Image (cartoon, rainbow, N blue to C red):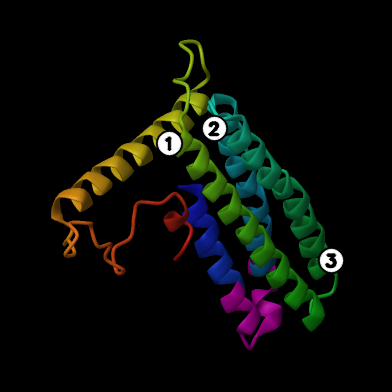
Amino acid sequence: MVAKEMAQQMFQIAKLARGRNRLENKMEMINTAKAIASNAKFILKFAHVIAEQSVDDRSKSDLLYYAEYLPTISTQLKIISSVKAATPSDISADAMLVKNAQNLMQAVVKTLKAAEAACVKGLRPPEQDASSDHTEAADLAFQWKKNLKRQRAIEALTASRDQLGLRRREKNTSTPSLVDIVHV
């Protein structure tokens, strides 16, 4: 998915910023930053599709609130990468580029968490004449929710119980998450 690609690109920017030969890495760093910024459009589109299909108004407004930051931060990232192109050996431009890319990734994570909340609350199925983007986003959301339900059912059957018969939650188990695909 796009979010995992963005996370890998973010890792690459951080690695390039720490590199010794800044002039050689300059164009690669700029191009990677621009790619991250353009990939944010896909996350924004996904968020809008999930918000349109959400049955809960509160989770819909939360999702749109977090998604609202993506275009602003991605535009800032494009501007900073253009500044970086004009000033090749400016260390502060490197730091600003990395920090802005981190801010964009944090906004992506918050948006995906809000999308999870909307999926858990419930989504309307896509209309018959919906675009392929709507269908793909809905399929991803329904597949994630199905995996979450399966994991919870397995956990309910196999979890250890305390003396009152209540399930103990294992600390080292993780539930399926849309956000997990962001972390490298």
Name the residue rendered at 29%, 69% in the picture: 172
Q: Work out whether 178 lies above or below 30.
A: above
Magenta stretch, residue numbers = 14-28
Q: Residue at x 19, y 64 (%)?
A: 162
Write down the residue under mark 2. Answer: 50
Count the numbered circles shown: 3
Residues marked 1 and 2 touching at CB (< 8 Å):
yes
Label 2 SS: helix
Report the Cα–Cα distance between label 3 and label 1: 38 Å
Q: In the image, is residue 27 part of the stretch drawn in magenta?
A: yes
Q: In front of the other: label 2 or label 3?
A: 2
Q: Secondary structure at mark 1?
A: helix
Residue on which disc 1 sits: 141
- Of circles 3 and 1, the one toward us is 1
Q: Position of residue 73 (x, y in %)?
A: 75, 54
Nearest to N terminus: mark 1 or mark 2: 2
Q: Nearer the viewer, residue 107 or 2?
A: 107
Give the amino acid type for the residue marked by disc 2 in the picture.
Answer: Ile
Q: 175 above or below 15? A: above
Q: What amino acid is found at the position of numbered circle 3 in the picture? A: Val
Q: CA distance from mark 1 to mark 2?
A: 8 Å
Which corner quadrant of the image does residue 48 belong to? top right
Q: Residue 68 at what x, y percent from top left?
A: 72, 43
Instruction: Name the secondary structure under disc 3.
Output: helix
Q: Which residue is mark 3?
A: 83
Residue 9 appears at what percent x and percent y? 55, 63
Visible residue check, residue 90? no
